[in-house]
Image (spheres, rainbow, N blue to C red):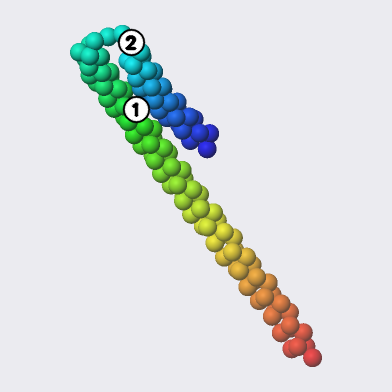
């Protein structure tokens, strides 16, 4: 569970970083004394950088999700195996108890048969 929180925190941090960068660059462009051509060039460069960062974030996010899916699959498999083992153990215990009960029942039948045959 802690791994899930850490993964979510990392993703949230990365998204906040990208969002902060976008907002900061937008404010800087609006207040910078540049010509229209320079501003358009800056916007183009910034758009390219932002696209690259977004692709990196998406790659990181997909890697994190893939890792989480793998871990969940492993845990589910472990739990399934554990459940099978527990069910097998419970079955064996139940069969053993039934066998012991049958043995005791046979002993009691024998005792009763001896008691009634003496009379």
x and y percent of residue 106 in the render? 66, 76
Residue underneath mark 2: 32
**Which one is earlier in the sequence, the residue at label 2 or at label 1?**
2
Query: Is 39 positioned to the left or the right of 119 in the image?
Result: left
Residue underneath mark 1: 57
Q: Image quadrant of residue 28?
A: top left
Q: Image quadrant of residue 66?
A: top left
Query: Is 118 positioned to the left or the right of 92 in the image?
Result: right
Image height check: is 59 above or below 46?
Answer: below
Image height check: is 1 above or below 98?
Answer: above
Identify which residue is drawn at 52% across, 37% down. Answer: 1
> Which is in the foreground here, disc 2 or disc 1?
2
Query: Is 91 positioned to the left or the right of 105 in the image?
Result: left
x and y percent of residue 4 in the render? 48, 35
Identify which residue is drawn at 63% across, 73% down. Answer: 102
Q: Image quadrant of residue 103?
A: bottom right
* SS of the residue under disc 1: helix
């Amino acid at each position: 569970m802690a791994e899930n929180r850490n993964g979510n925190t990392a993703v949230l941090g990365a998204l906040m970083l990208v969002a902060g960068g976008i907002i900061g660059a937008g404010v800087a462009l609006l207040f910078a004394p540049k010509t229209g051509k320079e501003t358009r060039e800056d916007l183009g460069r910034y758009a390219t950088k932002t696209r690259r960062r977004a692709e990196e974030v998406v790659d990181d996010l997909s890697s994190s999700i893939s890792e989480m899916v793998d871990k969940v699959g492993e845990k589910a498999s472990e739990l399934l195996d554990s459940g099978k083992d527990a069910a097998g153990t419970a079955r064996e215990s139940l069969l053993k108890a039934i066998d012991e009960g049958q043995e005791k029942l046979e002993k009691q039948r024998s005792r009763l048969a001896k008691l009634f045959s003496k009379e």
